[in-house]
Image (cartoon, grey):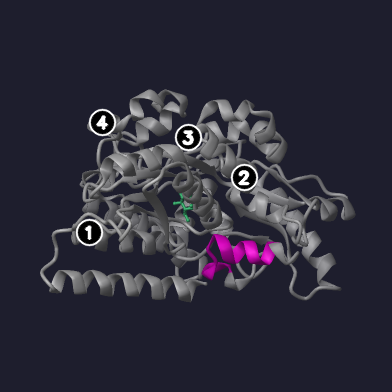
Amino acid sequence: MLKRKWLLGVALLLVLSLVLAAGCGEAEEVVDDDDEIVITVAAGAVGMELELTRDLAEMYSAENEGVRVEVLDTPDMVEDRLGLYLQFFEAGSSEVDVYQIDVIWPGDLAEHFVDLYEHGADEVAGDHFPAIVENNTVDGRLVGIPWFTDAGLLYYRTDLLEKYDLDPPATWDDLEEAAQIIQDGERAENPDFWGFVWQGRAYEGLTCDALEWIASNDGGTIISPEGVITINNPNAIEIVDQAAGWVGTISPDGVTTMAEEESRAVWHAGNAAFMRNWPYAYATSQADDSPVKDLFDVSPLPAGRSGAGAATLGGWQLAVSQYSENPEIAADVALYMASYEGQKYRAVEGTFNPTIMDLYEDAEVLEAAPFFGSLYDVFINAVARPSTVTAPQYSAVSELFYNAVYDVLIGDTNAADAFEELEIDLMDLTGFDAE
Ligand code: GLC
């Protein structure tokens, strides 16, 4: 799958360079033989994402004669997807009309997108969570319509907690203990069994996981919303050292190569007691062919010193390219996909969290995803990464952070040394002061 996506990425870049080399940089309107307008949506393919986006594309095309919506499958890893998008932007390419963009990107990428307020979004913006709309508003321009929101959750096996007479863990210490007990017990029959899987690879997902550990331990958010570098503090250091202790004990050594889909594969096979993941994994785990169907539940992530768990705020928006030849129609497609019905479809079929507040009271949505109601507080209190305050440098900030955490996880250094160095690197990069 990954290989296929990479080939697609490479093929696209080749096409782009050929077009540029031929001196045809100025894009022409994409109209095929039947005078049909083609709108291309660059979208994610994690869990059921791709098929659900394709369904919506087909629905739009069926309802709008003369327009065909196509979906371009992009790499799973945030960095890789961003790299592909940047190639399109640098080329001023009209190849993609609508981009699915991460909640951390509006500040970094605003210049490449049209203001959706000029294309009808003013009528619907008020239906969405105000904090997400604000996140997507750069200099008064709405650069993306919220599509779905995300927050980290703890997945746990209800059958195994019952078998070992354990409660869902309230703290990281509880989780360590429960994971060890279940792992020790299950290993007798299943040598591939692990206590806890999560996202430990050096990439944006590790920034999300580590921010959750740190925020839950009263260790701040790397850089405060006011622009103060806070990462080099004892509570942050303590919990990251603790997490490094999971690698090779309750978590496989290979956890430091895992992104969302790799950890989900272990969980799906029935080989993990606990998993940290986003809500999309609920629908896939409940699928008819899933070995863990009806054998799991979700809860807030465990707490550290703060006494409460913290979930990183994730999520994706639909943005219309400045370089689109058909921005008006592209915006209509984006607003259609992010509408009440569009979000409802994805929530019911794929447990993608809506950004439209009323959908959290929709009976069909709550039936398909009961945790949207029971864990509502987790979703509205999710902790933001410092992307607004560091824009347009967020990606570089995050890269420094996840590499520092990664070095601790693989045992190259300890968190005290890693964060002392990180603090200096962040000061150099951002010009901000440290606490
Ligand atoms: C999820 C989140 C996104 C985050 C990514 C990290 O897709 O929605 O915000 O950046 O995971 O892997």
Q: Residue furthest left?
A: 23
Q: Earlier in the sequence, mark 4 or mark 1?
A: 1
- Nearer the camera: disc 2 or disc 3: 3
Asked if one can make out residue 51 in the rendered structure from this viewpoint, the answer is: yes
Q: Quadrant of residue 180?
A: bottom right
Mark 2 vs mark 1, CA separation in Å? 33 Å
Front: mark 4 or 2:
4
Within-10-Å neighbours for mark 2: few <14, some 14–19, many 20+ = many
Question: What's the residue type where badge 3 is placed?
Answer: Ser
Is the CB of mark 3 within 8 Å of ligand 1?
no
> Which residue corresponds to mark 3?
339
Q: Which residue is mark 2?
A: 351
Q: Helix, strand or loop at disc 2?
A: loop
Instruction: Give the structural element (helix, strand or loop) at label 1.
Output: loop
Residue at 23% across / 50% down in the picture? 325
Q: Which numbered disc flags the more N-terminal residue, 2 or 3?
A: 3
Which contiguous range is marked in magenta? 255-267
Amino acid type for the residue under numbered disc 1:
Ser
Which residue is denoted by mark 1 in the rendering? 93
Choose the circle earlier in sequence order: 3 or 4: 4
- Would the CB of label 2 be found within 8 Å of ligand 1? no
Taking the image as shown, residue 384 lies to the left or right of residue 361, namely left
Mark nearer the viewer, 2 or 1 = 1
**Percent coordinates x, y for residue 245 in the rendering:** 60, 63
Main SS of the magenta part reads helix
Q: Nearer the viewer, residue 281 or 229?
A: 281
Residue 118: mark in rendering: 4
Which badge, 3 or 1, comes first in the chain's sequence?
1
Question: How far apart are the alpha carbons under marks 3 and 4?
Answer: 17 Å
Q: Position of residue 300 (x, y in %)?
A: 64, 41
